[in-house]
Amino acid sequence: MKLKTTKKQIRENAKQLYAVGYCDLDNLLVYQSPFAYSSGAYGWSCDYYQFDGVVISTGYSPTGESIAYDLIKKYNNLAKKTHSRDEMGELLQDFLNEITKKKVKK
C-alpha cells in the first residue's frame, strides 16, 4: 500500500531525489513497488521508489534532479532484455550507482 505524501515532504526528507518521466523506467522498476505517491489539482502526479537513501520520483509531474534521458533509455532498454529478478536487481544497482556516481560494489 502506498502512502499519500506531498512533494514538499519528499524534497525535505530525501537525501538524493531524482525525477524520471512517466513510464520512462517501467521495465527497470517492474519488480519494485512504490512506497508513496503525490497528487495535485489534476489528480495523480508521481510515485516514489526508495533505494538505500536514493528516492526516484516517476510520473507525469515528478520532482527532483533530472537524469539524462540517454542514461534512462539505456537502462530501460537493457531491462527489456532481462527477465531474471536477480539480474534485474543487479541492473538496478548499476543504474543507481551511475546516477549517484558511486563505484560498483563487488
Image: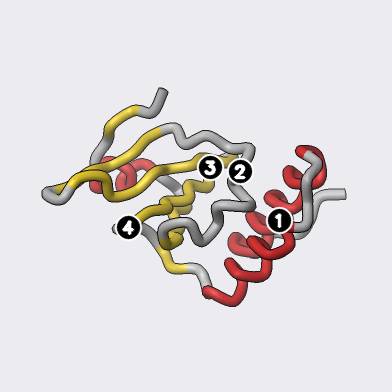
* Cα distance in 3D space between marks 2 and 1: 9 Å
Q: Which amino acid does label 3 sit on?
A: Gly
Q: Do the residues labelled 4 and 1 touch (CB within 8 Å)?
A: no
Query: Is the C-beta separation of discs 4 and 2 under 8 Å?
Result: no
* Nearer to the camera, 5 or 102: 5
**Circles 3 and 1 in contact, beta carbons < 8 Å:** no
Q: Distance between the residues labelled 4 and 2?
A: 18 Å
Q: Residue 29 carries which label?
A: none
Sequence-first tag of 4 and 3 = 3
Look at the numbered disc 2 and give the secondary structure of its residue.
Answer: loop
Checking the image for residue 53, the label placed there is 3
Is 54 above or below relative to 21?
Answer: above
- Does the residue at mark 2 contact the one at mark 1 (Cβ under 8 Å)? yes
Measured as percent of width and height from the top left, residue 32 is found at 58, 37
Q: Is residue 64 left or right of residue 27?
A: left
Per the image, the residue denoted by label 2 is 30
Q: How far apart are marks 3 and 1 (CA)?
A: 22 Å
- Precedes in sequence: disc 2 or disc 3: 2
Q: Are marks 4 and 3 in contact (CB under 8 Å)?
A: no
Q: Nearer the viewer, residue 42 or 11?
A: 42
| Nearer mark to the viewer, of 4 and 3 | 4
Q: Name the residue under label 4.
A: 60
Q: Which of marks 3 and 1 is nearer the N terminus?
A: 3
x, y percent for residue 3: 34, 28
Q: In the rendering, which numbered label is found on residue 79?
A: 1
- Nearer-N-terminus badge (4/1): 4
Total marks shown come to: 4
Spatial CA span between label 2 and label 3: 20 Å
Q: Which amino acid does label 1 sit on?
A: Ala
